[in-house]
Image: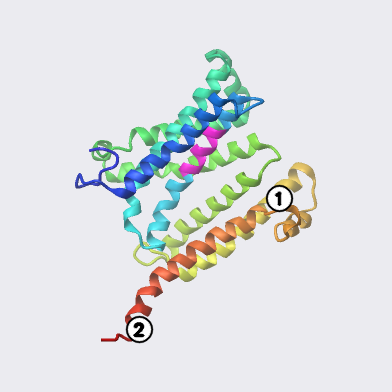
C-alpha cells in the first residue's frame, strides 16, 4: 500500500496532500543551502532547520488525537503515523547534517554528544524516535501485540519533553518558539490527563477544552518568567506583564492562548452548528 492510500487501497486526498507537504520544508532547506541563502553559516542553519521541523512534526503528530475528537474529523488519524515517521526523518537529517559539518568525524561527533548535555539529550530523543519509527508498521503492531505496542509508543511523551529541553538549551536566550512549543506540550499533556479524569468515552467535554485552553497560556507565561528569573535574574513581573503587551512584540503566552481558543471555537461550531441548522425553518 502506498503512503497516499487509505486502508481500503483507495487514493486519499488528505494523505496525498500531507505526504507532499511533509517534503516541502526539506526541499526548501536544500534549495536555500544550494543557493547560498543560509549564510553566514549554512551548515549550522540547515542543522537548525531540520531539527526545528522534526520538533514541529512531532507535535503535529501528538496533536492529531485531540484535534480529531474536538473538531470531529476522524479521518485525521490516517496521517498520524505518516507525520510521526516524517518527524524521525527530519531528526535523522538533523544529525546527518551535524556529522557532515564535522566532516563525518565520528569520534569527534561522539565526543561532542557525550560532553555537551544538550546534545546528549537530543541524541537520546532521536534514539527514542528511531525506536518508534521502526515499530510503526502494522506488522510490528501484530508482532508486539496491541498492548505492548501502545506501552512502547507512550514513550513519545517523554521523547517530546526531551526534544523541548534540547531546543531550549540550544536556543539559549532566543526562546520565543521553544516557549510556545512548551506551552503546546502543556496543553497536549493536560488534554490527555483530563480525558482520563473527566472524559466521556475518550472525549473531553468542550467546557474542559476551553478551561484547558485558558490554563495552558498561564502556565506558559509562568514557565517563561521562571526561566528568565533563574537564568538571568529578571524580575518575573516584568516577563509576565510583557506577555500581555505588544510593546515587546507578540509573546509566547498569547500565541498559545490564540491556538487553544481557535481549537475550542472550531469544536463549538462543529458541535452546535448541525443543531442550529436542524432548527432553522424550512421553506418549500
Question: Residue 110, position in %: x, y?
Answer: 55, 19
Element class at badge 2? loop
In magenta, the rendered stretch is: 49-58
Q: What is the total number of numbered labels drawn onto the structure image?
A: 2
What residue did someone put label 1 on? 226
Please give the name of the residue rendered at 60% of the width and 50% of the height, measured from the top-left corner: 180
User: In the image, is residue 26 above or below residue 227?
Assistant: above
129, 104: nearer the viewer: 104
Counting from the top left corner in percent of width and height, residue 36 is at 59, 25
Q: Camera-side residue: 48 or 116?
A: 48
Which residue does the image show at 67% across and 53% down from the upper left? 251
Residue 169: mark: none
Q: Answer above or below: position of 259 versus 7.
A: below
- Residue 88 placement (x, y as % from top left): 43, 34
Question: Please, which colouring scheme is shown?
Answer: rainbow
Determine if residue 151 is in view.
Answer: no
**In the figure, is residue 90 to the left or right of 150?**
right
**Secondary structure under badge 1?**
helix
Question: Split into 4 quadrants, where in the image is the N terminus?
Answer: top left
| In the displayed structure image, the side of residue 55 where residue 204 appears, left or right | left
Mark with earlier residue (1, 2): 1
**How busy is the neighbourhood of tag 1: few (under 14 within 10 Å), some, or many (20 plus)?**
some
Determine whether 1 is above or below 119 in the image: below
Q: How far apart are labels 1 and 2 at the CA level?
A: 51 Å
The residue indicated by pointer 2 is: 280
Q: Nearer the viewer, residue 23 or 195?
A: 23
Amino acid at each position: 500500500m502506498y503512503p497516499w492510500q487509505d486502508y481500503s487501497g483507495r487514493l486519499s486526498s488528505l494523505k496525498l496532500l500531507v505526504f507532499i507537504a511533509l517534503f516541502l520544508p526539506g526541499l526548501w532547506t536544500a534549495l536555500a543551502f544550494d543557493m547560498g541563502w543560509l549564510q553566514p553559516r549554512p551548515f549550522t542553519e540547515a542543522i537548525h532547520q531540520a531539527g526545528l521541523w522534526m520538533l514541529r512534526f512531532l507535535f503535529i503528530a501528538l496533536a492529531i488525537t485531540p484535534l480529531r475528537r474536538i473538531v470531529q474529523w476522524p479521518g485525521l488519524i490516517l496521517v498520524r503515523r505518516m507525520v510521526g515517521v516524517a518527524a524521525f526523518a527530519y531528526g535523522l537529517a538533523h544529525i546527518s547534517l551535524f556529522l557532515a559539518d564535522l566532516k563525518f568525524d565520528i569520534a569527534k561527533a561522539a565526543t561532542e554528544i557525550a560532553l555537551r548535555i544538550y546534545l546528549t539529550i537530543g541524541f537520546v530523543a532521536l534514539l527514542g524516535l528511531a525506536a518508534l519509527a521502526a515499530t510503526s508498521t502494522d506488522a510490528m503492531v501484530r508482532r508486539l501485540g496491541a498492548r505492548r505496542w501502545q506501552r512502547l509508543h507512550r514513550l513519545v511523551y517523554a521523547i517530546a519533553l526531551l526534544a523541548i529541553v534540547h531546543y531550549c538549551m540550544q536556543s539559549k536566550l532566543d526562546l520565543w518558539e521553544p516557549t510556545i512549543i512548551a506551552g503546546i506540550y502543556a496543553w497536549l499533556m493536560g488534554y490527555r490527563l483530563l480525558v482520563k479524569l473527566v472524559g466521556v468515552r475518550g472525549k473531553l467535554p468542550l467546557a474542559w477544552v476551553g478551561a484547558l485552553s485558558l490554563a495552558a497560556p498561564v502556565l506558559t507565561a509562568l514557565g517563561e518568567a521562571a526561566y528568565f528569573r533563574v537564568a538571568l535574574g529578571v524580575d518575573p513581573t516584568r516577563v509576565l506583564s510583557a506577555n500581555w503587551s505588544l510593546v515587546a512584540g507578540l509573546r509566547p503566552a498569547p500565541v498559545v492562548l490564540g491556538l487553544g481558543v481557535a481549537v475550542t471555537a472550531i469544536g463549538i461550531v462543529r458541535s452546535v452548528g448541525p443543531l442550529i441548522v436542524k432548527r432553522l425553518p424550512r421553506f418549500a
